[in-house]
Image: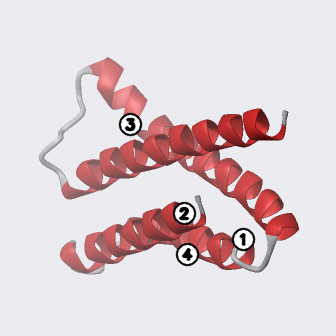
Amino acid sequence: MTQTTRLVGIALAVLGLGSYWGTGRTSVTALIPAFFGVALIALAWVAARGDAARRHAMHVAMLVALVGIAGTASRLLPGLFGGTLDVTRPAVLAQITTVLLLAWYLSKGIQSFREARRNRA
């Protein structure tokens, strides 16, 4: 799971930087996926230090993913339900990509936690 965390973190960092540079560096909010990515990369680094650190770091990483999903989806849902979501805008595409990537990561993390619990029992 540590490697998956690192890869998702790198993907989010690239997405955030690409969004920022791709939109002409007009808004720092385009870097939000990168902030989540850097946090996940740091947690993957902590997790690589040992078993005790890995357990705690992966739980925090799941919390980061959950907060990222909630925060990003809260920006998408009003437009989605109001029928005003413009999926051709780069910011909206970056938000959708962030939510999907973090949701996939969170599901993989939950599966990993369940498997670890079964293996301990």
Image position of 20 (left or right of 121): left
| Residue 26 visible | no
Q: Which of marks 3 and 1 is in front?
A: 1
Q: Quadrant of residue 83 in the image?
A: top left
Quick one: 8 or 12, which is closer to the camera? Answer: 8
Q: Residue 15 carries which label?
A: none
x, y percent for residue 16: 37, 70
Earlier-in-chain disc, 2 versus 1: 2
Which class describes the residues within 10 Å of circle 1: few (<14), some (14-19), or many (20+)? Answer: many
Q: How far apart are marks 3 and 2 (CA)?
A: 24 Å
Tag 2 and tag 1, C-beta contact below 8 Å: yes
Earlier-in-chain disc, 3 versus 2: 2
Q: What kind of element bears circle 1? A: helix
What residue is drawn where x is 31% and y is 20%?
82
Q: Which amino acid does label 1 sit on?
A: Ala
The residue indicated by pointer 1 is 47
Q: Distance between the residues labelled 2 and 1?
A: 9 Å
The residue indicated by pointer 4 is 38
x, y percent for residue 15: 32, 68
The quadrant the N terminus occupies is bottom right
The residue indicated by pointer 3 is 76
Q: How far apart are marks 3 and 1 (CA)?
A: 32 Å
Q: Nearer the viewer, mark 3 or mark 2?
A: 2
Quick one: 39 or 5, which is closer to the camera? Answer: 5
| Residue 43 visible | yes
The residue indicated by pointer 2 is 5
Earlier-in-chain disc, 4 versus 2: 2
Q: What kind of element bears circle 3? A: helix
What residue is drawn where x is 74% and y is 33%?
118
